[in-house]
Amino acid sequence: MTNPLAPLPERSEPDASDSATDALCARIRGGEQGAFDTLFLQHYTQLCAFANSFLHAPDDAEEVVQTVFHRIWQGHSTWHPKGGVRSYLFAACRNQALHLLEHESMVSRSSGYVAEVMRGYSRATSPLDVMEAAATSTRLRAAIAELPERRRRVVVLRLQYQLSNGEIAQVLGISVKGVEIQLRRAILDLRQRLQKARVLGLV
Amino acid sequence: MADDRHDFEDADLDRLEQLLRGEGTPRERAAAEAELRRRPSGQALLATLTTLDASRGLLKRWDASTALERFHKANELRGVRRPPRLVFHSERAGKRVRWMASAAALAGAAMIAVVVRNGAEDAKPGDQGAPPPRDIVTAPGQRAVLDLVDGTRVVLSPDSHLRIAGGFGAPNTKREVSLEGEALFVVPHDSARPFVIHTAHGSVEDLGTEFMVSTYPELNGTRLAVREGKVALHPRVPTPPSATPEMPVVAAILSPGDIGIMRSNGGVQIAHGQDLSDLFAASRGALTIRAQVLEEAIPRLERWFGVRVRVVDRALQSRRLSVELRDGTATDAFAIIALALKARASWHQNQVTLESDDLRGEDK
């Protein structure tokens, strides 16, 4: 087991896809709808899931993402996503979702979400959801859901959306150092919770 | 599918930590994932990671290809000035297009003027067979005025579809159209060329008149209101042996002031001597709602303004609404509606939420 207190390295090696993404952005700036469509198809579903994590309203989540892409398309000729495309998209969706939350005062709904995840079955709306509800009570999902809010977001952005430390920092509006601290603490938390569950026979 | 019964092994926890740390090159990470997939416990871990923020069902709901189509369609309508065109929409009335925050929709039912040719003029030498039909479709929040080649004027209401038969207006042929939704017809009489409107519940034959035909879903039938002249109703009836004496099959002739409804079972109901001013208001660009329960009025409001209406409390849903709305924006209109209902209207993109003032007072 590696030392959870060891510094977490930033991914210094450039991702092979960075240059391809830069080229895609250049084509979008040139007004190429096909390039915009590619961007849309690559990220849409993930962004809806991310927006939904704030709103807990699937239709509203779609509207948030549609709004973000609409703004990109409207201003495509001068679109230079700072910090990279993914962090731009996730940050924009987060900001739009939070704006919506502030406007509609839906905080009370957000705070009730963790409890609903744990219950699982009550939110099932389709056979697939029923099966998924059975899976949602795995220890990992429960352990992540129990993390403090900011730590949970950092973990999900890393594990589900595979963002880098820098991208996560930009999305959440915190420092890269802050991201590293949250990840270190999350590693400790999750190991303790998952190992404890096994020891106690919670299987 | 990943099985929840498999316990996590130490190797899985190490892998989880590695994923959190983001260590390794992309190739190394891909190899590590492949290793995880070889074990059921690893598969469970990976499956869980892809659905932390949303269930698999929700991820399927957010289909990117379908969403992209809607996105481009909404952007076509969003403040883009286009000349009127003949289109055929495969998505029919009743579906809510939630991103239609176009200037036209927000300004109430915008008018599009269309001149429709009879299609025969498009025929080239050597063409065989009847010309193809022409389709006029209005979205929620749109209306259209059509002048057909025979001099008929049609005012197509929001969320409606008019199909004009190929060769319409040719000599010695019936003038035939099909309608879903609602339209006002002002038809010059021509005994040699009857004007026929086909709907899902039967057909309406003009005998030289001005009348309004509506087939909106909440009517559960086709409604005809006659302002001038006479119109014949030909209900579509089920074929025997299910037909019974209770299901009339004869046509009905309607005169000015009559309202007739053809039901899907072939039945026809007629009321005489009616005040038709509210029904015909739509053709003049006005929406009139008279003492109608809000819950029942919502489909009309949504269609007219091209917005989605959400009502927070049941008590508000059962309140009666009386308004006449003409010109102005949807925002203005719902401010008036909210005032009339002692409620508050709030907007989010293309959706208006109505909440009773009484309820808001209790929440504070």
Image (cartoon, coloured by chain):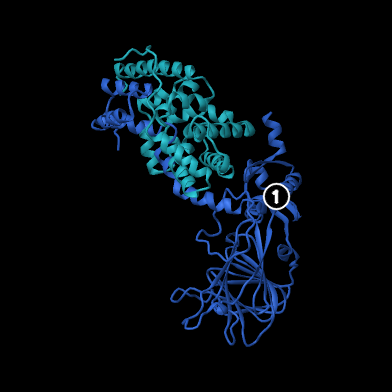
Q: Quadrant of residue B278?
A: bottom right
Q: Report the front residue among B300 and B322.
A: B300
What is the quadrant of the C terminus of chain B in the image?
Answer: top right
Letter of the cyan chain: A
Question: Could you tell whether B2 is left or right of A79 in the image?
Answer: left
Whether residue B99 is situated above or below residue B111 in the rendered picture: above
Q: Quadrant of residue B231?
A: bottom right
Residue drawn 44% across the image and 22% down it: A146
Q: Residue A59 appears at what percent x and percent y?
A: 53, 42
Q: Quadrant of residue B357?
A: top right
Q: Residue furthest left?
A: B38
Residue at the disc numbered 1: B330
Q: Residue A119 appears at what percent x and percent y?
A: 43, 30
User: Type of residue at label 1?
Assistant: Ala
Q: Report the front residue among A39 and B305.
A: A39
Whether residue B314 is situated above or below residue B200 in the rendered picture: above
* Protein chain holding label 1: B
Question: Could you tell whether A123 is left or right of A95 in the image?
Answer: left
Q: Residue B355 appears at what percent x and percent y?
A: 67, 40
Question: Could you tell whether A117 is left or right of B137 in the image?
Answer: left
Q: Element at badge 1?
A: helix
Whether residue A10 is situated above or below residue A78 in the rendered picture: above
Residue drawn 56% across the image and 34% down it: A97
Residue B242 shows in this picture: yes
Q: Dot 1, how many residues are within 10 Å of its Cα: few (below 14), some (14-19), or many (20+)?
A: many
Give the colour chain B carries in the figure.
Answer: blue
Residue B96 shows in this picture: no
Q: Residue B84 appears at what percent x and percent y?
A: 62, 64
Whether residue B89 is situated above or below residue A76 in the rendered picture: below
